[in-house]
Amino acid sequence: MRTIAIAITLVTVVGTTSLGHAQSDAGRREASAHFQRGVELYNDGDYRGALVEFKKAYAIWPRANVLYDVGQTEFQLNDYAAALKTMERYLAETGPNAAHRSEVEATVETLRGRVGRIALMTSVPDCEVAVDEQPAGTTPLQQRILVSVGARRLTMTCPGRAATTRTIEVAAGELVRLDPKLAPPAPASLTLRAPAPTPTVDAPRLTSKGSVAAAWTVSAVLAAATIGVGAATLVEQSRLSQLKSTFPTTREQLDAQSNLTLGLAIASDALAVASLVAIGVSTYVTVKYHRERKLRLGLAGTGVAVASSF
Protein backbone atom coordinates (compact mmCIF):
# COMPACT_ATOMS: atom_id res chain seq x y z
CA MET A 1 0.00 0.00 0.00
CA ARG A 2 1.38 3.39 -0.98
CA THR A 3 1.62 6.34 1.43
CA ILE A 4 -0.52 8.45 -0.92
CA ALA A 5 -3.36 5.90 -0.68
CA ILE A 6 -3.40 6.08 3.11
CA ALA A 7 -3.34 9.85 3.01
CA ILE A 8 -6.42 9.86 0.76
CA THR A 9 -8.24 7.53 3.15
CA LEU A 10 -7.30 9.78 6.07
CA VAL A 11 -8.94 12.74 4.36
CA THR A 12 -12.08 10.66 3.86
CA VAL A 13 -12.12 9.64 7.53
CA VAL A 14 -11.72 13.20 8.76
CA GLY A 15 -14.12 14.78 6.29
CA THR A 16 -17.08 12.35 6.47
CA THR A 17 -19.58 12.89 9.25
CA SER A 18 -21.77 9.78 9.24
CA LEU A 19 -21.91 6.01 8.60
CA GLY A 20 -25.55 5.00 8.93
CA HIS A 21 -25.74 6.80 12.29
CA ALA A 22 -24.32 9.95 13.83
CA GLN A 23 -20.96 9.87 15.60
CA SER A 24 -19.81 12.35 18.19
CA ASP A 25 -17.07 14.86 17.43
CA ALA A 26 -15.01 13.39 20.27
CA GLY A 27 -15.28 9.91 18.73
CA ARG A 28 -14.26 11.18 15.31
CA ARG A 29 -11.28 13.02 16.75
CA GLU A 30 -10.14 9.93 18.68
CA ALA A 31 -10.55 7.70 15.62
CA SER A 32 -8.65 10.21 13.51
CA ALA A 33 -5.80 10.32 16.05
CA HIS A 34 -5.45 6.53 16.00
CA PHE A 35 -5.59 6.52 12.22
CA GLN A 36 -2.88 9.17 11.95
CA ARG A 37 -0.60 7.15 14.26
CA GLY A 38 -1.29 4.14 12.05
CA VAL A 39 -0.17 6.12 9.00
CA GLU A 40 3.05 7.16 10.73
CA LEU A 41 3.84 3.63 11.90
CA TYR A 42 3.08 2.19 8.46
CA ASN A 43 5.41 4.67 6.78
CA ASP A 44 8.11 3.74 9.34
CA GLY A 45 7.72 0.04 8.45
CA ASP A 46 6.11 -0.91 11.78
CA TYR A 47 3.22 -2.83 10.23
CA ARG A 48 2.16 -4.59 13.41
CA GLY A 49 1.85 -1.30 15.28
CA ALA A 50 0.04 0.26 12.32
CA LEU A 51 -2.44 -2.62 12.22
CA VAL A 52 -3.32 -2.10 15.89
CA GLU A 53 -3.96 1.61 15.33
CA PHE A 54 -6.03 1.08 12.17
CA LYS A 55 -8.21 -1.52 13.89
CA LYS A 56 -8.66 0.79 16.88
CA ALA A 57 -9.76 3.61 14.60
CA TYR A 58 -12.27 1.33 12.88
CA ALA A 59 -13.63 0.07 16.22
CA ILE A 60 -14.27 3.64 17.42
CA TRP A 61 -15.67 4.97 14.16
CA PRO A 62 -16.46 2.19 11.65
CA ARG A 63 -15.67 3.34 8.11
CA ALA A 64 -15.50 0.91 5.22
CA ASN A 65 -12.59 2.86 3.73
CA VAL A 66 -10.47 2.04 6.80
CA LEU A 67 -10.84 -1.65 5.95
CA TYR A 68 -8.73 -0.96 2.86
CA ASP A 69 -5.82 0.15 5.05
CA VAL A 70 -6.34 -2.72 7.49
CA GLY A 71 -6.29 -5.25 4.65
CA GLN A 72 -3.21 -3.74 3.01
CA THR A 73 -1.35 -3.82 6.32
CA GLU A 74 -2.30 -7.48 6.87
CA PHE A 75 -1.00 -8.15 3.34
CA GLN A 76 2.33 -6.56 4.27
CA LEU A 77 2.49 -8.89 7.32
CA ASN A 78 1.96 -11.92 5.02
CA ASP A 79 -1.28 -12.72 6.85
CA TYR A 80 -3.00 -13.59 3.60
CA ALA A 81 -6.05 -15.23 5.15
CA ALA A 82 -6.85 -12.20 7.32
CA ALA A 83 -6.16 -9.81 4.41
CA LEU A 84 -8.51 -11.77 2.13
CA LYS A 85 -11.33 -11.63 4.69
CA THR A 86 -10.82 -7.89 5.19
CA MET A 87 -10.65 -7.09 1.48
CA GLU A 88 -13.77 -9.13 0.73
CA ARG A 89 -15.52 -7.30 3.54
CA TYR A 90 -14.41 -3.98 2.00
CA LEU A 91 -15.94 -4.95 -1.34
CA ALA A 92 -19.19 -6.03 0.38
CA GLU A 93 -19.52 -2.76 2.32
CA THR A 94 -18.65 -0.31 -0.49
CA GLY A 95 -20.36 0.58 -3.74
CA PRO A 96 -19.13 0.02 -7.31
CA ASN A 97 -17.63 3.52 -7.44
CA ALA A 98 -15.69 3.25 -4.17
CA ALA A 99 -12.08 4.37 -4.09
CA HIS A 100 -9.54 1.57 -4.63
CA ARG A 101 -12.28 -0.90 -5.65
CA SER A 102 -10.55 -2.09 -8.83
CA GLU A 103 -7.26 -2.33 -6.94
CA VAL A 104 -8.91 -4.32 -4.14
CA GLU A 105 -10.59 -6.71 -6.62
CA ALA A 106 -7.17 -7.47 -8.14
CA THR A 107 -5.69 -7.93 -4.67
CA VAL A 108 -8.46 -10.35 -3.73
CA GLU A 109 -7.65 -12.52 -6.75
CA THR A 110 -3.99 -12.56 -5.72
CA LEU A 111 -4.85 -13.46 -2.12
CA ARG A 112 -7.10 -16.34 -3.15
CA GLY A 113 -4.01 -17.98 -4.57
CA ARG A 114 -2.20 -17.68 -1.23
CA VAL A 115 -4.63 -19.38 1.13
CA GLY A 116 -5.86 -22.88 1.94
CA ARG A 117 -8.41 -24.38 4.31
CA ILE A 118 -8.46 -26.79 7.24
CA ALA A 119 -11.37 -29.14 7.99
CA LEU A 120 -11.35 -30.47 11.55
CA MET A 121 -12.53 -34.08 11.77
CA THR A 122 -13.57 -34.27 15.43
CA SER A 123 -16.83 -34.95 17.25
CA VAL A 124 -15.68 -33.49 20.57
CA PRO A 125 -17.71 -30.32 21.29
CA ASP A 126 -16.81 -27.07 23.08
CA CYS A 127 -13.12 -27.10 22.11
CA GLU A 128 -11.50 -23.69 21.59
CA VAL A 129 -9.57 -23.69 18.30
CA ALA A 130 -6.70 -21.31 17.54
CA VAL A 131 -4.44 -20.99 14.49
CA ASP A 132 -1.07 -19.35 15.10
CA GLU A 133 -2.38 -18.23 18.53
CA GLN A 134 -5.38 -16.46 16.92
CA PRO A 135 -8.91 -17.69 17.85
CA ALA A 136 -10.59 -19.58 15.01
CA GLY A 137 -13.82 -20.74 16.67
CA THR A 138 -15.32 -23.42 18.91
CA THR A 139 -16.15 -26.98 17.89
CA PRO A 140 -18.23 -28.11 16.19
CA LEU A 141 -17.08 -25.71 13.44
CA GLN A 142 -19.69 -25.16 10.75
CA GLN A 143 -17.14 -23.83 8.24
CA ARG A 144 -13.63 -24.77 7.23
CA ILE A 145 -10.84 -22.64 8.66
CA LEU A 146 -9.30 -20.23 6.15
CA VAL A 147 -5.49 -20.06 6.65
CA SER A 148 -2.48 -18.59 4.90
CA VAL A 149 -0.19 -20.93 2.97
CA GLY A 150 2.79 -22.39 4.83
CA ALA A 151 3.29 -24.06 8.19
CA ARG A 152 0.36 -23.32 10.48
CA ARG A 153 0.19 -24.07 14.21
CA LEU A 154 -3.25 -25.30 15.27
CA THR A 155 -4.15 -25.62 18.97
CA MET A 156 -7.29 -27.18 20.46
CA THR A 157 -8.20 -26.67 24.11
CA CYS A 158 -11.05 -28.91 25.29
CA PRO A 159 -12.71 -29.05 28.74
CA GLY A 160 -11.24 -31.83 30.88
CA ARG A 161 -8.40 -32.56 28.44
CA ALA A 162 -4.84 -31.40 27.93
CA ALA A 163 -4.36 -28.93 25.06
CA THR A 164 -3.49 -30.51 21.70
CA THR A 165 -1.18 -28.76 19.23
CA ARG A 166 -0.43 -29.74 15.63
CA THR A 167 1.75 -28.12 12.95
CA ILE A 168 0.21 -28.39 9.49
CA GLU A 169 1.69 -27.64 6.08
CA VAL A 170 -0.95 -25.94 3.90
CA ALA A 171 -0.44 -25.33 0.17
CA ALA A 172 -2.32 -22.79 -1.96
CA GLY A 173 -5.91 -23.89 -2.63
CA GLU A 174 -5.46 -27.05 -0.54
CA LEU A 175 -8.08 -28.48 1.80
CA VAL A 176 -6.38 -30.26 4.70
CA ARG A 177 -8.58 -32.71 6.59
CA LEU A 178 -7.25 -33.04 10.10
CA ASP A 179 -8.11 -35.53 12.84
CA PRO A 180 -6.30 -33.90 15.78
CA LYS A 181 -6.19 -37.05 17.98
CA LEU A 182 -7.14 -35.25 21.18
CA ALA A 183 -5.66 -36.20 24.53
CA PRO A 184 -7.86 -38.60 26.55
CA PRO A 185 -10.10 -37.13 29.28
CA ALA A 186 -8.47 -36.80 32.68
CA PRO A 187 -9.41 -39.76 34.93
CA ALA A 188 -11.91 -39.09 37.68
CA SER A 189 -10.16 -38.61 41.00
CA LEU A 190 -11.05 -40.74 44.00
CA THR A 191 -12.01 -38.77 47.08
CA LEU A 192 -11.19 -40.42 50.41
CA ARG A 193 -13.21 -39.08 53.29
CA ALA A 194 -11.91 -39.20 56.81
CA PRO A 195 -14.09 -41.19 59.19
CA ALA A 196 -16.45 -39.20 61.36
CA PRO A 197 -14.99 -38.38 64.78
CA THR A 198 -16.09 -40.64 67.61
CA PRO A 199 -18.63 -38.81 69.80
CA THR A 200 -17.43 -37.89 73.26
CA VAL A 201 -19.12 -39.74 76.12
CA ASP A 202 -19.32 -38.70 79.72
CA ALA A 203 -18.01 -41.93 81.22
CA PRO A 204 -15.11 -44.01 79.87
CA ARG A 205 -16.09 -47.34 78.38
CA LEU A 206 -14.04 -50.49 78.61
CA THR A 207 -13.03 -52.13 75.37
CA SER A 208 -15.25 -55.11 74.63
CA LYS A 209 -14.37 -58.39 72.98
CA GLY A 210 -16.93 -57.57 70.26
CA SER A 211 -15.04 -54.35 69.38
CA VAL A 212 -11.83 -56.31 68.86
CA ALA A 213 -13.61 -58.85 66.64
CA ALA A 214 -15.31 -56.10 64.59
CA ALA A 215 -12.02 -54.24 64.09
CA TRP A 216 -10.22 -57.33 62.78
CA THR A 217 -13.20 -58.23 60.57
CA VAL A 218 -13.05 -54.83 58.90
CA SER A 219 -9.27 -55.18 58.50
CA ALA A 220 -9.67 -58.59 56.88
CA VAL A 221 -12.32 -57.33 54.45
CA LEU A 222 -10.17 -54.36 53.40
CA ALA A 223 -7.11 -56.57 53.00
CA ALA A 224 -9.07 -59.00 50.82
CA ALA A 225 -10.41 -56.14 48.71
CA THR A 226 -6.89 -54.76 48.30
CA ILE A 227 -5.63 -58.13 47.08
CA GLY A 228 -8.57 -58.53 44.68
CA VAL A 229 -8.30 -55.06 43.15
CA GLY A 230 -4.51 -55.37 42.99
CA ALA A 231 -4.83 -58.64 41.07
CA ALA A 232 -7.34 -57.05 38.70
CA THR A 233 -4.91 -54.17 38.14
CA LEU A 234 -2.12 -56.58 37.16
CA VAL A 235 -4.46 -58.35 34.73
CA GLU A 236 -5.50 -55.08 33.06
CA GLN A 237 -1.87 -53.91 32.89
CA SER A 238 -1.04 -57.15 31.08
CA ARG A 239 -3.92 -56.56 28.64
CA LEU A 240 -2.70 -53.00 28.02
CA SER A 241 0.79 -54.29 27.20
CA GLN A 242 -0.72 -56.82 24.80
CA LEU A 243 -2.78 -54.11 23.07
CA LYS A 244 0.30 -51.94 22.61
CA SER A 245 2.10 -54.80 20.86
CA THR A 246 -0.94 -55.91 18.79
CA PHE A 247 -1.66 -54.57 15.31
CA PRO A 248 -4.02 -53.19 14.34
CA THR A 249 -5.09 -51.43 17.54
CA THR A 250 -7.07 -48.18 17.55
CA ARG A 251 -6.29 -45.17 19.70
CA GLU A 252 -9.73 -45.43 21.31
CA GLN A 253 -9.01 -49.01 22.50
CA LEU A 254 -5.68 -47.98 23.98
CA ASP A 255 -7.23 -44.95 25.72
CA ALA A 256 -10.08 -47.03 27.20
CA GLN A 257 -7.71 -49.74 28.46
CA SER A 258 -5.29 -47.15 29.85
CA ASN A 259 -8.07 -45.34 31.75
CA LEU A 260 -9.36 -48.65 33.19
CA THR A 261 -5.88 -49.68 34.32
CA LEU A 262 -5.23 -46.28 35.89
CA GLY A 263 -8.57 -46.32 37.77
CA LEU A 264 -7.89 -49.79 39.18
CA ALA A 265 -4.37 -48.77 40.24
CA ILE A 266 -5.71 -45.72 42.11
CA ALA A 267 -8.42 -47.83 43.80
CA SER A 268 -5.84 -50.46 44.78
CA ASP A 269 -3.60 -47.82 46.38
CA ALA A 270 -6.55 -46.32 48.26
CA LEU A 271 -7.62 -49.71 49.59
CA ALA A 272 -4.05 -50.49 50.66
CA VAL A 273 -3.89 -47.29 52.69
CA ALA A 274 -7.28 -48.01 54.26
CA SER A 275 -6.15 -51.57 55.11
CA LEU A 276 -3.02 -50.32 56.88
CA VAL A 277 -5.08 -47.84 58.88
CA ALA A 278 -7.60 -50.54 59.84
CA ILE A 279 -4.85 -52.95 60.91
CA GLY A 280 -3.27 -50.24 63.05
CA VAL A 281 -6.59 -49.49 64.73
CA SER A 282 -7.26 -53.19 65.26
CA THR A 283 -3.85 -53.70 66.88
CA TYR A 284 -4.43 -50.75 69.19
CA VAL A 285 -7.89 -52.03 70.22
CA THR A 286 -6.53 -55.51 70.83
CA VAL A 287 -3.65 -54.32 73.04
CA LYS A 288 -6.00 -52.07 74.97
CA TYR A 289 -8.48 -54.89 75.46
CA HIS A 290 -5.83 -57.26 76.88
CA ARG A 291 -4.49 -54.59 79.22
CA GLU A 292 -7.96 -53.96 80.61
CA ARG A 293 -8.49 -57.67 81.14
CA LYS A 294 -5.35 -57.93 83.26
CA LEU A 295 -6.11 -55.03 85.48
CA ARG A 296 -9.30 -53.06 86.08
CA LEU A 297 -9.26 -50.29 88.54
CA GLY A 298 -12.55 -49.00 89.87
CA LEU A 299 -14.11 -47.28 92.79
CA ALA A 300 -15.87 -49.53 95.30
CA GLY A 301 -18.38 -48.47 97.89
CA THR A 302 -15.84 -48.57 100.75
CA GLY A 303 -12.62 -47.76 98.93
CA VAL A 304 -10.59 -48.67 95.90
CA ALA A 305 -10.98 -52.23 94.66
CA VAL A 306 -8.61 -54.08 92.37
CA ALA A 307 -10.32 -56.78 90.34
CA SER A 308 -8.69 -59.33 88.09
CA SER A 309 -10.55 -61.34 85.47
CA PHE A 310 -9.48 -64.44 83.59
Image (tube, rainbow, N blue to C red):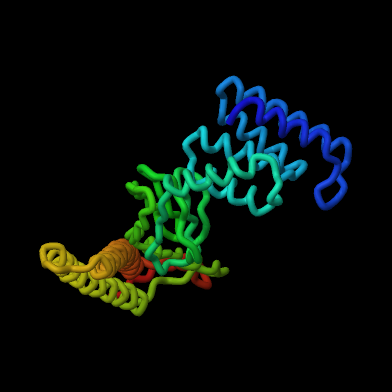
Q: Quadrant of residue 260?
A: bottom left
In percent of the image, x 67 and y 33: which residue is there? 53
Which residue, as the protein is rendered here, is positioned at the far top?
Answer: 44
Number of marks present in the image shown: 0
Against 161, residue 151 (above or below) is above
| 237 or 51, nearer to the observer | 51
Q: Residue 46: give x, y in percent of width and height.
A: 57, 25
Q: Is residue 98 left or right of residue 295?
A: right
Q: Quarter of the image containing the C terminus?
A: bottom left
Q: Residue 179: give x, y in percent of width and height.
A: 33, 61
Which residue, as the protein is rendered here, is positioned at the far bottom?
Answer: 210
Q: Quadrant of residue 220?
A: bottom left
| 89 or 108, nearer to the observer | 108
In percent of the image, x 42 and y 47: which residue is there? 113
Q: Is residue 34 visible?
A: yes
Q: Quarter of the image containing the N terminus?
A: top right
| 176 or 275, nearer to the observer | 176
Against 53, residue 81 (above or below) is below
Against 293, residue 119 (above or below) is above
Q: Is residue 264 visible?
A: no
Q: Residue 273: give x, y in percent of width and height.
A: 31, 61
In percent of the image, x 34 and y 64: which residue is there? 281
Q: Quadrant of residue 257?
A: bottom left
| 289 or 59, nearer to the observer | 59
In percent of the image, x 15 and y 67: which residue is there? 243
